[in-house]
Image (tube, rainbow, N blue to C red):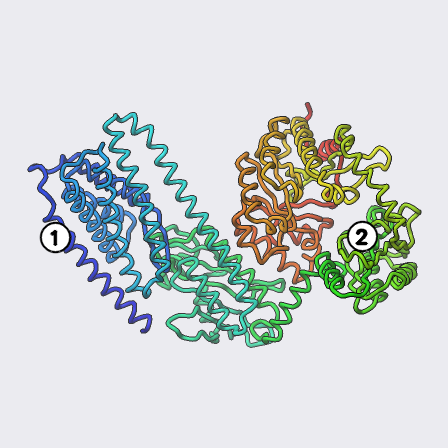
Amino acid sequence: MSALARGLRGVRGVRALTVASALAMLALLRLLPAGPAQGPELSHWLAFVGAFAVAEVLVVYVEFRHEAHAFGANEIVLAAGLLLIDGVGLVTAQLAGAAIALLVRRQQLLKLCFNVAQWGLCAAVAAVAFAAVDPTPDAGSAATVAAVLGAVLAGSTVSFLAITAVVWMVDGAPGRAESVEALLVGYVGAVATACLGLTLVLLLRTGIVAVCCALPGVVVAMVSYRAYMVGRERRQHLTFLLSATRALNASPDLERGWADVLAALRDAVRAEWATVLIAPPEAKDPAEWLQLDCAKDGVRPVFRTVTAEEAAALLPPPGSGGVHDVRRRLGAVDWLARHGMKSAMTAQVCDELGLLGHLVVGPRLGETGRYAEHDLTLLEALANQVGGALETGRLERTLFQITELKEQLQHEARHDSLTGLANRTQFNAALSAGLVGTGPTSVMIVDLDDFKRVNDDLGHAAGDALLVAVAERMRATVRTLDTPARLGGDEFAVVLPQCAAGDAEEIAQRLLREFAVPVAMPGGGQLVPRASIGVATTDAVRRDGDELQRRADAALYEVKRNGKGGVRAWHPAVGAARDRRRPLLADVTSALAQGEFVCHYQPVMSLVDDAPLGVEALVRWQHPEQGLLSPGGFLRQAEDSGWIREIGEHVLRSACHQFVRLRRHTPHLPAGLQVNVSALQLDPTLPRIVAAALAATGMQGGDLVLEMTEGLALDSPELAAEVMESVAALGVRWALDDFGTGYAALDRLADLPVDIVKLPGEVVRGAQSPRGARLLAGTVALARTMGVEAVAEGVESEAQRAALTAAGCLQGQGYLWSEPLSADELERWLVERGAAVPA
């Protein structure tokens, strides 16, 4: 059946249903028992007319398919009316109140008539059912309460059937699951609001003061439900965006994939139609655009060419993108009038070279008839994803190119963005694979000596150049079956399967010889990299990957302890030396008592005006013999031994105490102390620990942000959600570190009470390439769709700052502003920047 034929059938069906509802209502009115001869008092009847009108204004819409099921305060008035006025007066008051509200909203005549008729029928059914079940009502009796609730549910059922019939006539039969969901939601809302109506009647018997006391609770309940529906719609939008991204990247049929995405977009924002217009490439005829509509009526969608004039007619004037609404006088009102539309949305599709096309969404269906800001956010986020999909080869990419792109994305997820070597994830996978066989497997840990001095003296560009050169030499020196990796910072590693201890040590020596060749620096001059290497090989007893890495680390430590710049293979004597170092962890008890675990702080800055927005606390160990130890020197052992819980609790209290003192001296420093949480701390005791730290230091919960990695949240989502919700109840916010590494599980992240996401340094560093810029923009758009703030980590240059602000990220931290500072250094830093207010 064509869309025109279906539309005509739908109009005729709605007219017939409206007439049938009106006739049924009149028939039911004749069944109602006669009330007082003079009918209800005029003042009472007018009060109910006004109440029904206000109830229609306060309605909440539960939308599915292209229609909406509404419930709200109407059942409150209906339930009260069943007890306070006669049935005929109640039905006529319902008719008059609904008509007034819909006339004020300028609803279309046919829809107005249908809604008034079905609401009148609903009231008539409720009145007849109530009169039949309880002819002599007593508001204080359980029988009367049950009769009122049953009558309201009977009326709601009639209303649901009428609306379902309209959906079937206009848009085809709704799915069983959708129908059951809408019916159950309607029943729950009807019972809840009818109970409020009964409560109102009982309170009226008590006095007007009791009504006034109860009214705020009713208002809060309605507002809370509206907030729930907004959150539900946001979750649906996020789910749509994720599925749309998968469809664009994975569909073997480009036209079908695009059409399905447009159809999903149309349904997500409840629009009449959606279309995409693709601008012609520079090499082609500029007068030929491509247009694709969403799939409908079983017709296979096909890209078709349109002239530049036709494309211009479909688009609003340049510079007027966004939401367009005639009633609110938003956007291109004249353009809407020319096309006979009351609302629409448009968004540009761009890449780094310029305009690629436009997404256009037609008028919004359903009762509300207008688009909200979150609808536009969804459209713009999709436009960003569309831009990434269109950039390479436009619509002329082959299935081979799509497969190649997916493989590249998978490669990027498992490799270091700076050096191209495997990252820690790929390194662990290669090590696990190497341990499956029966032959010896070796691991090599490579640490660049004095690398921090290179960054401090020559700058981070020189440091990056040195890391890249080291990676290239590792790749050229190891065997083809080996897996060189960069684990982070200046730490590298190699998995050497089927490699005996002697062979592994020989390869390590070759690496040192290659490192001895000077590396040209970007600003001129040369630098000779120095490295310490630890090697470990599996033995006949243990084939444990973690133990193999610990042995290689122990061997590396021996090299560092003996002057750096050499190779050491693990053997039992090295293991004994490692065991002798274990007293370091035995010092934890005294270190906690003596306050040796201290916090350094890195400011979180506004990328717009360089204003400090908060700080992140980073733990250090001020060891009395070994000096200031960075987290890498003790946190891993602390986690293995279980001491991380005590250290984490100490750091939390210390950071809160110092931040409270800092806020007293710098009152203009905005709230925002970020403290990291380890995996072992995320247990049911964490809310109690946080509450105790806040109480002991006098810090407000809203000033504290706890930070955990995205992987930790995804490894145990149920536990994470439970603990995070309990902590959030204290007013504490949550930040998600390394956002984007768990992209496939974003739908699970949407269930967590996350307020801030932190973009990892590799995303920031890659933002200056076209693909990296699109990845950054897409990640920021996803964060905005989730309703959370985005903070960039590792910002080191003005170019990175510009790329971040262009992508919509407005907060960041990194060496562009400051390295981590002690509490006293941070206070002086703030004074120098003018953030402190003199006492």
Provide the secondary structure element on which disc 1 rests: helix
Q: Is residue 230 left or right of residue 562?
A: left
Q: Please name the residue that numbered disc 2 is placed on.
A: 490
Quadrant where the N terminus is found in the figure: bottom left
Question: Of all residues shown, which one is farthest toward the top?
Answer: 839
Q: In which quarter of the view is residue 828 placed?
A: top right
Q: Is residue 303 visible?
A: yes
Residue at screen point 10% across, 43% down = 33
Q: Is residue 241 left or right of residue 839?
A: left
Q: Which of marks 2 and 1 is nearer the N terminus?
A: 1
Provide the secondary structure element on which disc 2 rests: loop
Q: In this view, does 735 lie above or below 249?
A: above
Tell which of 49 and 743 is nearer to you: 743
Task: Measure the alpha-carbon separation of dots 2 and 1.
Answer: 85 Å
Relative image position of residue 273 (x, y in whole percent): 40, 64
Question: Of all residues shown, which one is farthest toward the front?
Answer: 541
